[in-house]
Amino acid sequence: MKKIIFVNATSLSTGGGLTILNNYINQVNSKKNSNELYYFFIPDNVIKVNKNSNIIYIKNSENEYYKNKHYWNSLGMKRWSINNKIKPDEMFSMQNYFPFGFKKDNIFKSVYIHQSIPFFPYKWSFCRKDERKLWFYKYIYIYLIKKSVKNADKIIVQTKWFRNQIMNKFNISKEKFVIERPDIPKVLPDNNDQIFFREGFKSLFYPASSDLYKNHEVLIKAMNIIVNILGKRDVLLYLTINKNDYRINTMISRYNLEENIILTGVLNYQQVLGLYKKIDLLVFPSKVETFGLPLLEVQQFGLPIIAGDLNLYKEVIGEYSSKVIYCPLDDEQAWADSIKEILDESFVFN
């Protein structure tokens, strides 16, 4: 009889979570073990890779027990298991905590922790609309993570830094942890001309969502120093944010930077790689990350990096041959000075 493995990944539809899921699907497909049968519970946008007959995909839209991620994790997966008369021998939750209802019994449980908001020192307010989600992760979601890591047989994280945070916060044995740095997908860059890219400028790039903790404000303030105080107007900052984002647009308008900050909208992975080939510098001031995949991606293009001064980023970047500067997260003058230092090799500020 085959060993049955449930892989819970219903909400990994974008960003780093989707990259993690696709990597794991490819990893399982490369296995030759015919004694394992995987049930992947996945979002609709995940491409089914079927090199291996021991994989069954259940997409959210095909799953009558999936109503939303909260229902699925509290009741849906257990109901699916009972009604289909399929009991797992192993459970691998790729989204930070285990679905409810599966007692320990003989189930080997593994959990992939990649939600790091509860492990950073920042405080968030429930009363502020733009912080409410962060408040939930910081003060409520952490208990789901705590329960899962206590019950897990194996805990997978991406860095030593994150392992140490979880170990110290919950008093978890080091032996439970496996560190798996994410692989960079082997995808060719999009070499087509991107209509938003403007030639003849020095270009900075920050690929990130518009979440508050991504800390776009320090970059916009640094651009104000570079453009309006130093008078250098041939510098552009590209942000992967929708053009109608009110908060970001308000900050851009405040400093009259409409001509120097380009909102590209969300880019697919090939487009991001294509933009790496065109830009001069990656900037990465995010206050909260689990890994920071662009810090690894950009290294294949040999670009200089300016990143927040966090031990996490120093671990991710490692011994990189190109220029790297670490800046205090909220010091716009330091960011402006560092941008100037790197770009000065190519032009002189007025």
Image (tube, grey):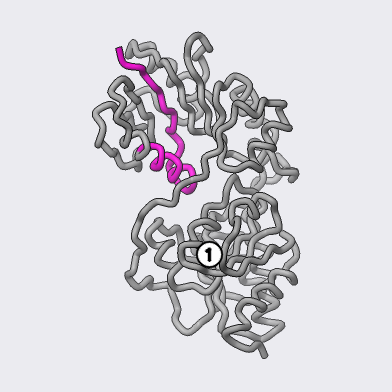
Quarter of the view holding residue 57: top left
Q: In the image, is 284 to the left or to the right of 77?
A: right
Residue drawn at x 69%, y 69% is 335
> Identity of the amino acid at label 1?
Leu
- Residue 85 position in % (x across, y down): 34, 10
Q: In the image, is 60 to the left or to the right of 94?
A: left
Quarter of the view holding residue 80: top left
SS label for mark 1: strand
- Residue 179 position in % (x across, y down): 56, 38
Placement of 118 over or under 244, stated as above or below: above
Residue 243 falls within the magenta-colored stretch:
no
Q: In the image, is 298 to the left or to the right of 256?
A: left
Which residues lie in the magenta part? Answer: 1-25
State the residue position of label 1: 239
Residue 4 falls within the magenta-colored stretch:
yes
Placement of 308 over or under 63, stated as above or below: below
Residue drawn at x 67%, y 66% is 325
Placement of 37 over or under 198, stated as above or below: above
Quarter of the image with the C terminus is: bottom right
Choose between 64 and 342: the one closer to the eye. Answer: 342
Choose between 42 and 66: the one closer to the eye. Answer: 42
Q: In the image, is 63 to the left or to the right of 8?
A: left
Residue drawn at x 61%, y 69% is 323
